[in-house]
Amino acid sequence: MEIVPMPTTRKIAIIGAGPGGLTLARLLQMNGANVVVYERDGGQLSRAQGATLDLHDDAGLKALRKADLMNAFEANYRPDADKLMVVDQDGTIILNNFVSGDHGPERPEIDRGPLRDLLINSLRPDTIVWNRQFTSLATVDGSIDLSFSNGESALADIVIAADGANSRIRPYITTIGPIYSGITIVEGNVYHSAKATPEIHKLVDNGKICALGNSKSLFVVSKGDGSLAFYTGHRTDELWFRDSNIDFSNRTEVLNWFKSEFSGWSVLWDALFENAEPNITPRPQYFFPMGRSWEALPNMTMIGDAAHVMPPYAGEGVNMAMLDALELAECLLSNDYPNVQSAIASYESQMRKRALASTHMTLDQTYAFHSPVAIPRLIEFFAEHIDAKVRAQA
Ligand SMILES: Cc1cc2nc3c(=O)[nH]c(=O)nc-3n(C[C@H](O)[C@H](O)[C@H](O)COP(=O)(O)OP(=O)(O)OC[C@H]3O[C@@H](n4cnc5c(N)ncnc54)[C@H](O)[C@@H]3O)c2cc1C
């Protein structure tokens, strides 16, 4: 059956209400498309959202401009939160108050929660169906029959996977899957950090800390609600989180692991683990194999982490997800393609090119941060920027 473009009469199901899925829903809906988002969370407030994200002018911000959401962004972003401090494992400051806008394009920061809220609030009520964890799909008479873990099902004409790194839909699109990068993150949150971890709270000063040493990393990121998010990075096996037998719900066990794995690091950092909320989470980091492609399907594609997960060290993930949303919306809404399959093929070809470049850059950064020469390399990197500024002023 030939599917015609302009999906205004066709039901588009987006699986996943992350930044990618919600941006796509907004862009399609404001142009008259019939969109439903299915999300596994029980509701908008059912889960604490992660830390701050910097949006790039040619990616995340570009999508928000097209979505007519810059006023909402300006009301919710966190000026000065892009302030970065680089320290070594002892907390000795190497670079202070580095602000992206002083050395290149501005990269304003917004916390994930407010970004998600402003996107949700831009959608018509009932666009998102909560408590729908996608489990499987089948094609029935040209429609796609979606099944969810609570026994519910729904029909759609076009399905977009926006269900993140462990996408359950991706295997229906391609057999290519993500590859382990060799780095695992251990992520935690500290609420009321001014009281709980005053020394680190003062050091982070509403911005971000990047601590490097011994081929390991620790990022501490302030949030607008007075909490801190932190994540360590170290080289280990893919299944370390399982095989180490660490009980990640037990702070003391995680602290003991940190003291041993990050031996030689200052006791300053211990306070993060001593005061972390119980849901400390190990996250092996993956990337999508580069330069591989698949044949476009007539009625299914993927965006964001589902299509090209990568480690967070270059701040590309959310920007790529939102730019995917913009480019896919433009392709699906365009009259330039003879059918939806061609629109999807065009989107996927641009997306793969972009993802290839960001994955390369992200992996370079990831391995640089986790190498014995992480600090000298970072000084070299920032020195270039500083030199460029000085040159411009001369
Ligand atoms: C510790 C950490 C720090 C990071 N820091 C940064 C940063 O500073 N800058 C940056 O750009 N990126 C960062 N990232 C990466 C960034 O979070 C992701 O790239 C981005 O969120 C991808 O957006 P997405 O919409 O594709 O997927 P997600 O944000 O993962 O959203 C997927 C959504 O789908 C839902 N879902 C999942 N499975 C199902 C299912 N089966 N059925 C229904 N719904 C489902 C989820 O609940 C979620 O709401 C970081 C990631 C981590 C882990």
Image (spheres, grey):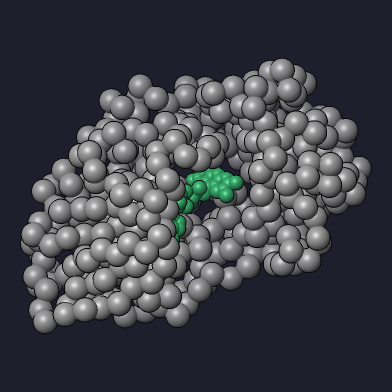
| Image position of 383 (left or right of 128) | right
Q: Nearer the viewer, residue 11 or 177?
A: 11
Q: Which of the 4 image quarters holds residue 136?
A: bottom left
The residue depicted at 15 percent of the width and 53 percent of the height is 34
| Image position of 221 (left or right of 298) | right
Q: Is residue 262 above or below residue 55?
A: below
The residue depicted at 72 percent of the width and 35 percent of the height is 276
Q: Nearer the viewer, residue 73 or 113?
A: 113
Q: How many marks?
A: 0
Q: Residue 40, image x and y in percent? A: 42, 53
Q: Nearer the viewer, residue 99 or 273?
A: 273
Residue 177 makes an appearance in the image: yes
| Image position of 123 (left or right of 274) | left
Q: Is residue 45 above or below residue 336?
A: above
Q: Residue 37, image x and y in percent? A: 29, 52
Q: Which of the 4 image quarters holds residue 304?
A: bottom left
Q: Residue 210, image x and y in percent? A: 69, 37
